[in-house]
Image (cartoon, rainbow, N blue to C red):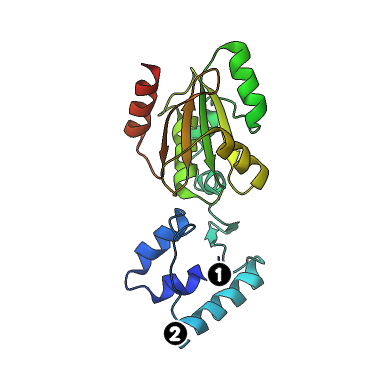
Amino acid sequence: AEAKVPYILCAKDRAKAYEEAMTGKLDDMKFTPCDDAAAAELVKTHKEIGEKVGGASIGTPLFLIDGQIVNGANIPLIEKILGATKSVALSAPAANSDLETSLEKAKAVGKPLFIQLGRETCGHCQALKSYIKEGTVSIDDFIYVDLDYDNEKVRKQFEAHFTVSGNILPFVVIADSNGNQITSRSGSGKPEEYKAMIEEAKK
């Protein structure tokens, strides 16, 4: 993760490079961090400030919002601090974090599965969770499974059952009640795209 910081600081368009890092596009991307003395000094300064105010590592973005320190892209906490509590009041489907148990449950109750494999620091992953929580993307007819990409055991279980084309998180799979993959997608998506994916899977 630390290698991403010089990449951002040396980029001609730092805002674009930062967005790439925050949305997970650099996670599986091969890139060569620049060797620039000014960038190295700036990284050192950022690291010293991060350690002083919150003990954050250089690879983790640190935000100071309304006097509160937020380590990483903790979208729910950021929304809470900013007063965006609307999503909290809404009824969201319960997310299951165990794939094997969810597959058994789906078969028992005869419901299809909506499976998301992502990570907490992935902006696209958090965006999808927000769509679901707010009801913008309705998955009431599905068993919702939210899996942690950084958990090797969980990731291998996912890969044993499903195949997703692409290498940008989140990986999203819709499977029938028997666990058979119907459709999948990778990377960022607008609510309309997820809705179309769900409608297509229901046919």
Q: Choose top left, top right, bottom left or bottom right for residue 47.
A: bottom right
Residue found 44% across the figure and 60% down from its top: 29
Pick out the residue farthest to the front.
Answer: 160
Q: Choose top left, top right, bottom left or bottom right for residue 136.
A: top left
Of 35 and 68, the residue lying toward us: 35
Q: How many labels, in total?
A: 2
Check disc 1: other Cα within 10 Å, few if <14, some if 14-19, many if 20+. Answer: few
Q: Is residue 55 left or right of residue 83?
A: right
Q: Is residue 116 left or right of residue 185?
A: right
The image quadrant where one finds the C terminus is top left
Q: Position of residue 162 (x, y in %)?
A: 52, 34
Residue found 54% across the figure and 48% down from its top: 81
Q: Position of residue 4 (x, y in %)?
A: 49, 68
Check disc 2: other Cα within 10 Å, few if <14, some if 14-19, many if 20+. Answer: few
**Mark 2 → mark 1, Cα distance in angstroms:** 15 Å
Task: Say what amino acid the circle numbered 1 marks.
Answer: Glu
Task: Say what amino acid the circle numbered 2 marks.
Answer: Asp
119 relative to 56, above or below: above
Pick out the residue farthest to the bottom.
Answer: 37
In contact (CB < 8 Å): disc 2 and disc 1: no
Q: Which is nearer the N-term, disc 2 or disc 1?
A: 1
Q: Callout 1: helix, strand or loop?
A: loop
Q: Position of residue 96 (x, y in %)?
A: 62, 29
Residue found 61% across the figure and 49% down from its top: 150
Label number found at residue 2: 1
Residue found 54% across the figure and 29% down from its top: 89
Q: Callout 2: helix, strand or loop?
A: loop
Label number found at residue 36: 2
Label number found at residue 113: none
179 relative to 149, above or below: above
The image quadrant where one finds the N terminus is bottom right
